[in-house]
Image (tube, grey):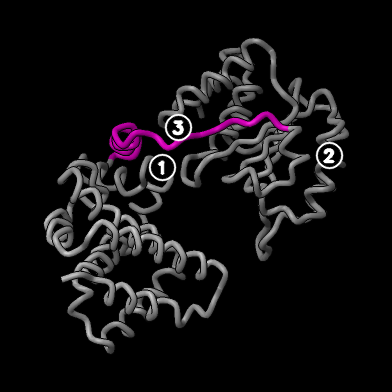
Amino acid sequence: MSFNNIPGQTKTKRILKDSIKKNRISHAYLFTGNNGLGKSEMAEEFAQAIFCENNVADGCGECLSCKKFAHGNHPDFHKITVEDDHKNILIEQIRELQKEISYKPYESDYKVYIIDEAEKMTMQAKNSLLKTLEEPPEYAIIILTNENKNELIPTIISRCQEVKLHNQPIEVVKDYLIEKKDFKPGDANLYATLSRGKYKKAVKLAFKNDFIENRNKVIELFANINSKDNFEIFNSADELVKLNDSEFPLFELILSYFRDILVMQRNGNNGLINFDFDNLIKKASENYSTEKLYELIKLINNYRDYYSRNVKKELLFPSLLLKIRNKKEL
């Protein structure tokens, strides 16, 4: 493992490497950034670099420590995640951390703990962790990963050094997919564009069963929505519910389609996310005013929020499709 396994993030990597070189490693970190950027992976690379016996501010992959880390049996590294059959990180898991952290490192100068998706800690777990963050042992490093730091309590945030990960340029993700994942250039370009600079998301989409087929159906549905009668609308809505419940990025795709129409009106083909549907998007751009597009994008965002809050899911998509159809200008 090495920082080189994560595409881009040059500034973030430099900050982490410098902290190791200068021996200025903090006791607590908060890795933030959009899901799909590799926050957990970056935290693990940082941990391995700290443990590495060759003092290269990165994982060398050759020393005994790096080999143990790669095989998942380094005695001074621990990762806490949501356990199977649970939705949250429980206070019992934090108490186990507190018990284990009291023992000095076995092999390294440090013990490193990663709490992945820290926002999923219960409130009791967060309050319990706060006690450890206030007075950590001198050898302890606790790394939290979280998409939005505002989901954590302010007192936890204040005791952590924030490390931000950023969406990367499309070319960076594209090159990664070609070089590291053996993607063909055309496929790499498509998935890098659809992922909006998130390499993990690009890989996930590429290996998701029937993703391209379902994506094509969704875009064609919205491109031809004005021709759909009510019966077809309700049938389509049922399919959208199934897709959204299967972790298909449905709302993101719908928003990207209408966003592309705006882009087409302003810049032509330059900057389209769904560039392989440029003909459909161009045709659609002739049927919407800019004002109407902004209304639709706001409407779709509202419905995404309703859906996340389980507001009568079976009725949301029929309502959304009917409103979009009725707002179409011809």
Residue type at mark 3 is Ile
Residue 166 lies, in percent from the top left, at 47, 35
Residue 195 lies, in percent from the top left, at 36, 47
Which range is magenta? 160-182
The residue at which mark 3 appears reads as 6
The residue at which mark 2 appears reads as 100
Q: Is residue 99 visible?
A: yes
Which quadrant of the structure image shows residue 180? top left
The CA span between labels 3 and 2 is 30 Å
Work out whether 245 lies above or below 145. Answer: below
The residue at which mark 1 appears reads as 198
Which quadrant of the structure image shows residue 113? top right
Residue type at mark 1 is Lys
Q: Nearer the viewer, residue 16 or 181?
A: 16
Q: Is residue 221 magenta?
A: no
Q: Are marks 3 and 2 in contact (CB under 8 Å)?
A: no
Image side of residue 159 versus residue 182, left or right? right
Secondary structure of the residue carrying tag 3 is loop
